[in-house]
Image (cartoon, rainbow, N blue to C red):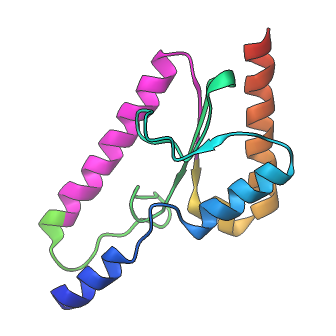
Amino acid sequence: MQDAQRSKIMSSIKAVSKLESLVTQELWKKGFRFRRNVRGMIGTPDIAIKKYKVVIFIDSCFWHVCPTHGRMPKSNIDFWKKKLERNQERDKEYTDFYLQKGWHILRIWEHEIRKDFDSTIDKIATFIEDAKAIEVL
């Protein structure tokens, strides 16, 4: 793939994916109230409910190196190896940060949403309800 073509593809990637929008729309319909892509928080969680100390990250299989679907691009291997390894390190740092601060953190892979949308929404809803029950006590 030529550099110009790759550049065009990479620039078309949005900060908020359609998948994230589908998930948040469904959660909103179920009555959950939250903030999306909270820039003031470490790691810019995709979903955050500060009142219940909940953060949810929806990780793409490519950018976060899913063990099932993550793959290394065939060109510019050194760059991508460093980039994707750093993404994984950062994910661990953010997870550790929130856990140390007593937050409830959930990471969802994009393939989970694609494979079984309804079950994934139920999983997220249960996670939020459980965190809410703990924080209300």
Q: Is residue 105 magenta?
A: yes
Judge by depth and name the residue closer to the eye, 118 or 43: 43
Q: Is residue 130 left or right of residue 103?
A: right
Judge by depth and name the residue closer to the eye, 82 or 27: 27
Image position, residue 128 (x, y; %) = 74, 34
Magenta span of residues: 80-107
Q: Is residue 46 above or below residue 102?
A: below
Image position, residue 113 (x, y; %) = 67, 62
Kindly indicate the quadrant of the structure image that contains residue 62: bottom left
Image position, residue 75 (x, y; %) = 18, 79
Residue, far top: 137
Q: Is residue 94 above or below residue 6?
A: above
Q: Is residue 41 above or below residue 32?
A: above
Q: Is residue 22 left or right of residue 29?
A: left
Q: Is residue 23 left or right of residue 108?
A: right
Q: Residue at x 79, y 8 (%)?
A: 137
Q: Residue at x 52, y 47 (%)?
A: 37
The main secondary structure of the magenta stretch is: helix
Q: Is residue 31 above or below residue 61?
A: above
In the rendered image, the quadrant that contains the N terminus is bottom left
Q: Residue at x 39, y 77 (%)?
A: 12
